[in-house]
Amino acid sequence: MADITVIGGINIDIEGRPFETLRREDSNPGKIALSYGGVGRNITENVVRMGGSVAMLSAIGDDHMGAGAKAHLEELGVDVSMIETRRNRTSAIYLSILNDKNDMELAISDMDVVKYILPDILDRNARALTAAKVIAIDGNLERETIEYAAKKFSGIPMFFDPVSTPKAVRAADVIGSFTCVKPNIMEAETLSGIRIESEADLKRAGQWFIAKGVRKVFITLNKDGVYYKDKDEEGFIRPGKVIVNSATGAGDSFSAAILMGMASGMGTKDIARYGMAAAQITMESSHAVNQYMCKEEIERRIKNV
């Protein structure tokens, strides 16, 4: 049984970039890239690259792309026995078209298969889930699934990544059931109802989560780092100098670092430092998950965090 189980989505990301100015209603020569993504999947890949023992519970369609995403995780060492294939369904796909300035021009998102990660799947895999040291919940899940997981596995340390402001509210009624949460400022505002415009506001929001029953809180601040809090301490970890190739996926690697810290009994401040080092490694890559992510590289960099 794996120490860490991530319950969340697996996406197939398809991105088109034109060589010249994008022409509407026409075929544009360019480059098309296909990669595996999804918050839950990215967190899972980061955990295994960090040396963690991890399983993923998810749903894919009965197509080659979903099978490829599952096989990729298995090759990395992830326990994929809880990834279910839904017949006559398409795997979650995010199709984006960029313009010649590399800004997104339009996109189509087909995430319906994630809706099939329902309580009955959790029940079928209850034995493996209850054996985990930590369970992670991806905010892309349906409210019903998030609430069910929070109540059914309340005796196990649980982590919640809100993913986005609209999706954060799905956990609003059970937020105190989570051992640890990692919202950004807007997600923290949505969940707490506290407008965050200063460090004092951040501390009030942090205390709100603690009062609800959350034990560890990490509020990410984009370029300004992260604010961390538990019942005994709080503080800020500011980012060091890093060459940013892409910020995509930095939050997912931070979440993975939190899971590694929770599984090993690391303190809140140390987890924040570990997460910051992991995020820096991710930002140096153009991919959502840096293939050079590893425990040794994080520990080398953490000295400067």
Image: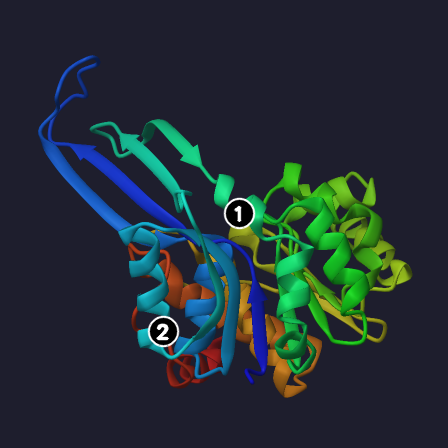
Give the residue at the far right of this rendering.
211
Q: Quadrant of residue 301?
A: bottom left
User: In the rendered structure, are the residues bearing label 1 and label 2 in contact, judged by CB atoms less than 8 Å apart?
Assistant: no
Q: Residue at x 32, y 31 (%)?
A: 103
Q: Is residue 260 left or right of residue 249?
A: right
What residue is shown with label 1? Answer: 114
Q: Quadrant of the N terminus?
A: bottom right
Q: Position of residue 50 (x, y in %)?
A: 43, 79
Depth order, front residue of 202/263: 263
**3D distance between C-alphas at marks 1 and 2:** 20 Å
What residue is shown with label 2? Answer: 74
Q: Residue at x 65, y 76 (%)?
A: 134
Mark number, residue 62: none
Categorize mark 1 by other alpha carbons within 10 Å: few (<14), some (14-19), many (20+).
Answer: many
Residue 134 seen by the camera: yes
Q: Quadrant of residue 224?
A: bottom right
Q: What's under tag 2, amino acid-wise?
A: Glu
Q: Is residue 62 left or right of residue 28?
A: right
Q: Position of residue 79 (x, y in %)?
A: 46, 76
Residue 243 seen by the camera: no
Categorize mark 2 by other alpha carbons within 10 Å: few (<14), some (14-19), many (20+).
Answer: some
Q: Quadrant of residue 287?
A: bottom left
Q: What colour scheme governs how the chains and residues are painted in the rendered image of this protein? A: rainbow
Give the answer, above or below, for where 302 lies relative to 175.
below
